[in-house]
Amino acid sequence: MTLPEIKPTDVDAILSAAAQRVAAIVREKQPLPSAFEFLGEFGDFELYGTFVSLKCGQQLRSCIGNMSVGSKLAASLDDAAMGAAKHDYRFPPISPQELHLLDIEVWLLFSPETIVEKGRDRLAHVEVGRDGLQIELGGRRGVFLPSVPVEQGWDKTTYFEQLCRKASLPQNAWLDEKAVIQKFAGVAHREPLVNWLASDDPAKKKTSVGLSTDEKAAKKRTTPPIPLWLERKPAVAGSFYPDHAIEETLASLTPSHLEPEKWTAAMVPHAGWVYSGQLAMQTLARVEIPDRVLILAPKHTAPGVPWAVGPFKHWLLPHLQLQGDEELVGKIVAEVEDIVPDKDSHIQEHAIEVLLPMLAHFNPKVQVTGVTLTHAPYAQLQKMGRELGEMLRGLPQGERPLILISSDLNHFASEAENHRLDAMALKAMQTWDAQHFYEVVITQNISVCGAAGIVVALEAMEILGKEGRMEKVGYCTSADAGGDTIRVVGYGGMLLR
């Protein structure tokens, strides 16, 4: 697959056209600029497809494109920019306040080729980092751009399996002889979106293809709040916790005669209340729950991005709603590079939801910010944690949130083995050495689902200036609540400051 040569001036025109259109759509300006205004005759250039991605740091904020043999560049770019600005169903629409925070990336796709081989023979005809992939089967379709497997560190098999998951197909559907799989080539160009926003002077709008070097240097990304307008509906009420008589249930789980104290952070389990609710309530009862709580939770579900803050105005519960924290969400998005706002990462996630009624029990006025985190290399988690710590350190002392780590411990070993592995993980956590904890969990294969949140919290507290006090409130397993002793899950309650 040979890629055509595209002149640097054409690249500038493409980036400027996409950026101007995205900005105009987001700001609801009319008439909308068209790529034809920037590309001229080059707008009739034929290709396989175009994608426009908007990214905050390394994390995707939106990505929409179209693929059709013989597509005309300008029309294809206009459609992709419109979709990226407003119509990526996985994310909230882009807000005007975000424009200075985002990079724009434009992919031009070429040379589609159907892989005629079947089964595992398809692997030999794909090169990671060179080929994008598309699968179609049973009316379902999934597409990955060439950069995706490189960014995720996937080998060929994982690339095909994840492509199937994206298409909502079984992960081995790529082996099905009826599956139509195409590979294609692509070239991408990326820069901060703000670099390509031309002057508002109408006389300059059609001729500008971006800012000068000095103008680019003068443009600084701002840190405005992300407007919250979504409501997160309960997903696991009636299963993980009751959908009625909630207060009565919580009262029965709450210990009496405990004096709450100020703690910087706490770790609580997030399983069904019948298994871990009592330990979670025992732990939270020891804490003065402030008006702000930041929950760091694992991501158990497939939809969405790896590291996401919930862009929710309200967290809805049966007969109750908790307020989202617009200011804190905005600060996280602006100052923690890898974390982006994404509703889909949170819609079905239970690890935050099961704790919300508990927080409301202790402080009905609490404002909640929820972040979901998947596994990542230690260096990336360390960076996230330190950026989060710097952001929190910039808040007045009385406005800093409680950091609440939502995590269960080892999963699905025998009861005796679970006790051994969980003791090892908690001992490593109590050293306050985030890297040591990470290495113990990885090398000993301890399936602590909230390990990423623990690392991020420990690193953040290092920046905040910890006292170095960590106290274990308790430990239990699913077997203690009547579960079987063969496939056991462990739970721990910890207090940190």
Image (spheres, rainbow, N blue to C red):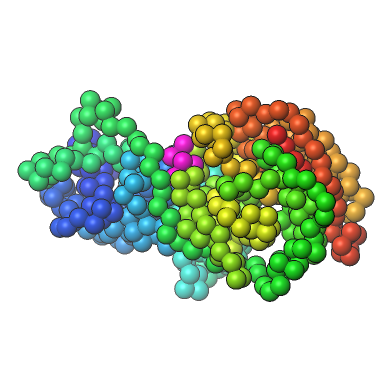
* Image side of residue 124 versus residue 423, left or right: left
Q: Position of residue 166 (x, y in %)?
A: 52, 60
| Magenta span contains residue 334 | yes
- Residue furthest right in the image: 416
Question: Which quadrant is the C terminus positioned in?
Answer: top right
The overriding secondary structure of the stretch rendered in magenta is helix
Q: 55 or 74, which is in the foreground?
A: 55
Q: Quadrant of residue 330?
A: top left
| Res. 48 in view | no
User: Please, is residue 272 above or below residue 207 in the view?
Assistant: below
Q: Position of residue 143 (x, y in %)?
A: 45, 58
Q: Is residue 8 visible?
A: yes
| 311 drawn magenta | no
Query: Residue shown at 82%/35% (left/top)?
Result: 427
Q: Is residue 350 left or right of residue 330?
A: right
Residue 65 screen position, x and y as percent? 35, 57
Residue visible at 34% across and 52% down? 95
Residue drawn at x 48%, y 69% as measured from the top left: 140
Residue under the image location 35 percent in, 37 percent down: 222
- Asked where in the image residue 203 lies, by quadrant, the reply is top left
* Magenta residues (range): 330-335
Q: Quadrant of residue 87?
A: bottom left
Q: Is residue 31 left or right of residue 467?
A: left
Closer-to-camera residue (20/470): 470
